[in-house]
Amino acid sequence: MTMQPQTAPTTAPGDTAESGFTLLELLVVLAIMGLLAAIIGPQVIKYLGSSRSQTAQIQVKNIAAALELYRLDAGSYPSPDQGLAALVTAPASAPAWNGPYLPQASALVDPWGQPYRFAAPGKHGEADVFSYGSDKTEGGSGEARDVGNW
C-alpha cells in the first residue's frame, strides 16, 4: 500500500486561511436594515392599530345582532341593570330567554380590554352598542374614535 503525501490547501496570494466580513461590510448591512425598519415599521404599527378598530366594529355588529335575537325572544332589550351580560347568562326577569345569544362573556370585551357599552333606548337607534376606543373616553379620532353600531 502506497501512501501519498498530504498537501496543504492552496490559497490565493494575500488571502489568509480565515475568512469573514469586514467592519465596513457589517456597517453597510446594518445601515440597510435600519432603513428598512424605518420605512416598514410605521406601516406595520398603523396596520395593527387599525385592525383593533376593525375587530371592534365586527364585534359590535355581532353583539347588536345578538341583542335583536334577545329582543325577539324576551319582547324587549335587556334593562340597564341586566346589561349585555343578559346575552350570555339568563336574567331572572326574562322567562322567555332562549340563549345564550353569545357563546362566551369574553365577547363582551372590546380589543382594548374594556367592556362594551350598551344603551336602550340609544342616541342613534333603539339600542346602541359601542366602545370608546383606545382612549376610553367619548369622542376621539383615529384609533381613539368611538366604535358603535350606528
Image: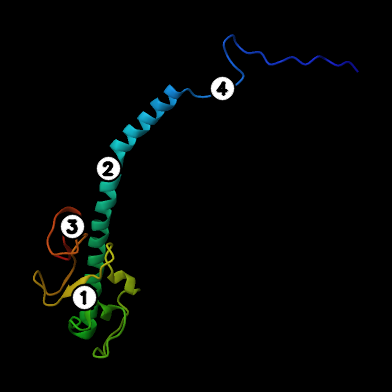
Q: Choose mark 1 or mark 2, whichever is in front.
A: 2
**CB within 8 Å, label 1 to label 2:** no
Residue 18 lies left or right of residue 37; in this view the side is right
x then y, percent, for residue 72: 21, 81
Q: Choose mark 1 or mark 3, whichever is in front.
A: 3
Image height of 21 relative to 55, above or below: above
Whichever of labels 4 and 1 marks the residue nearer the N terminus, that label is 4
Q: Which residue is mark 4?
A: 19
The local crowd at label 1, few if under 14, some if 14 to 19, many if 20 or more residues have their Cα within 10 Å, is some
Real-space Cα distance between discs 4 and 1?
A: 71 Å
Residue depicted at 66% across the width and 13% down the height: 10
Label 4: which secondary element? loop
Quarter of the picture containing the C terminus is bottom left
Q: Label 1 is placed on what type of residue?
A: Glu
Q: Which residue is mark 2?
A: 43
Image height of 43 relative to 1, above or below: below
Q: How many marks?
A: 4
